[in-house]
Image (cartoon, rainbow, N blue to C red):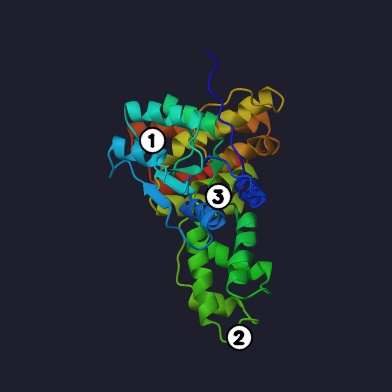
Amino acid sequence: MPRFQLQTKSFELAYKALDSGNLHPIYFLMGEDQFLHSFFIDKLTKLLFNDDSINKTFLIPDDMSSKEIIDQLVSQDLFNSKKLFILMNPNGLRGKTRDEIIKLYKNPPPNNILVLSHNEYGVKNKFMESLAILSKPIICSTPFENEMIKWGKLFFSKNGISDVSNNNISAIVRMAGDSLGHLKNEIDKISISLDNPNEINQIDITQFSGWKRNFRQYEFFDFLGKKELNKSLELGRALVLQDTTMINLLYPLTEFFQELLFIKIFNGTNSFKKGYSRLSPSVNKKLPNYAKNFKNKEIVFALKRLGQIDEKLKTSRIKDEPAITEFIYATLSNG
């Protein structure tokens, strides 16, 4: 039996498609950025109900019985009203309820729209695979920095501020760009505090923004894939000084370089793709581009170094910061 291959949609395209008015009976939001989940659901709510969200219902498997959830999804009223259901953590459903959901949405109830809100990337069982077949998942992962700048401009415009330079927004992203929610909060705070909203500068940003960001693994892998030594060192060190250990990084790093080698060997086509990956979807998507930056011998060298680090971690104590620093420097300086 062929291995399941996950196919997804970009958030931007799915969000724009809502404007057509041709709404689908089921949407599958997948990824860790809860701001994007809420942003999509808010637009869908406005399209369906304007400002009245009386027929929007959250379904939470941890707090509701299976019967309650199914009863809600099949419910109709005398006026045949439109209803919007948001099923949080669909993987939390158990037993026959999973089969009933799949059966129900093969022939969905009229006027009812279901949004699946799954805060992880990937499908780990047959039920989630079946949901992904019913509705191609929409990726809700925190964007890279260049995409964050577009969001920053949007957040400023919603505060009535339109003339903010990319450099100033980049500075805010560096401080608060670990999620879109944090970025929006900081921009809202800065916007409210400005004496003159048409004159924003670096002093305003540092004075009114008190957020100290946490860096994410996908940012580190992006700079590593681009072979940007200084940024890779900065983010690698930042990760292990936050709450990530070298052990936590070892397996995604190994997968990263294994995927690059596979792409190099098979001439840029990665035909084998796992249903589950330790790498974020945004990194997975860019693997062919990253592979172009490395020679085969550099990738093999990196994998050997990771094997050596693995042995050291099993047999002795090594400190995380020196370990990641040495690995990055040796790998990116080995051309």
Label 2 amino acid?
Asn
Above/below status of 97 relative to 335: above
Task: Read off the residue under disc 2.
Answer: 196
Of residue 277 and residue 117, the one placed in the foreground of this image is 117
Tag on residue 219?
Answer: 3
**Reading the chain from its start, which is encountered first: label 2 or label 3?**
2
Query: From the viewer's perspective, is 263 left or right of 89?
Result: right
Q: Position of residue 159 (x, y in %)?
A: 58, 74
Q: Secondary structure at mark 1?
A: helix
Name the residue rendered at 57%, 35% in the picture. Answer: 136
Name the residue rendered at 44%, 24% in the picture. Answer: 126
Query: From the viewer's perspective, is 195 left or right of 164?
Result: left
Task: Read off the residue under disc 1.
Answer: 91
Q: Position of residue 203 (x, y in %)?
A: 57, 79
**Reading the chain from its start, which is encountered first: label 1 or label 3?**
1
Alpha-carbon span between mark 1 and mark 3:
27 Å
Farthest-out residue, front: 78
Alpha-carbon span between mark 1 and mark 2:
48 Å
Q: Position of residue 97 (x, y in %)?
A: 35, 30
Q: Residues within 10 Å of mark 1 (few under 14, many from 20)?
A: some
